Image (cartoon, helix red, strand yellow):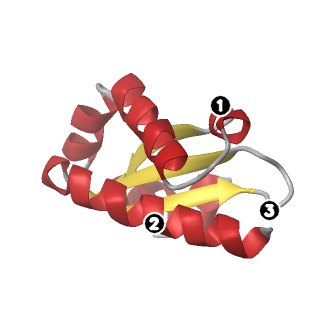
Amino acid sequence: MPTMRVFRLSRARRRLLREHAEAGVTDILFVGSMRLAGVAAWFCTATDDERDKLASHLPELERRFREVLGEVGFPETQVAECGATVESQETVDRDWGSNWRKAMQ
């Protein structure tokens, strides 16, 4: 049910934002399909330096992302298909004309 999926992603987003705010995460955007199991999280930072520091811990970030998805009620089979990446507003402004949608394609 798409509504439950959106609700669960919203809960996961709030939790992950609180946990990673000190690392410079300013937003988390999700890419996926309402019909397919997997979803990707884009952890957004303000600067390239913050992005690079966070990206150096990407395996741990992805592990925590998957843990939180399980905690908010996603089935393990769906969680296994999820991943994460990190990007900065600085790069999106410079390379994509401030357009996150283009950057995420």
Residue at image position (44%, 46%) is: 68
Disc 2 and disc 1: Cα gap in Å?
18 Å
Percent of width and height locating residue 22: 13, 52
Nearer the observer, 84 or 14: 14
Residue 27 at x, y percent in the picture: 36, 64
Secondary element type, mark 1: loop
The reply to whether discs 3 and 1 touch (Cβ–Cβ < 8 Å) is: no
Viewport quadrant of the N terminus: bottom right
Which residue appears at 58% of the width and 53% of the height?
A: 73
Residue assigned mark 3: 34
Q: Nearer the viewer, mark 3 or mark 2?
A: 2
Q: Amino acid at mark 1?
A: Ala
Amino acid type assigned to the residue bearing label 3 in the image: Met
Q: Position of residue 95 (x, y in %)?
A: 47, 55
Query: Residue 33 lies in what quarter of the image?
Result: bottom right
Q: Which residue is mark 2?
A: 11
The residue singled out by tag 1 in the image is: 80
- The crowd level at tag 2 (other Cα within 10 Å; few <14, some 14-19, many 20+) is some
Residue nearest the observer in this picture, 37 or 75: 75
Q: Are marks 2 and 1 in contact (CB under 8 Å)?
A: no
Compare marks 2 and 1 and give the one earlier in the sequence.
2
On screen, residue 73 versus residue 51, left or right, reads right
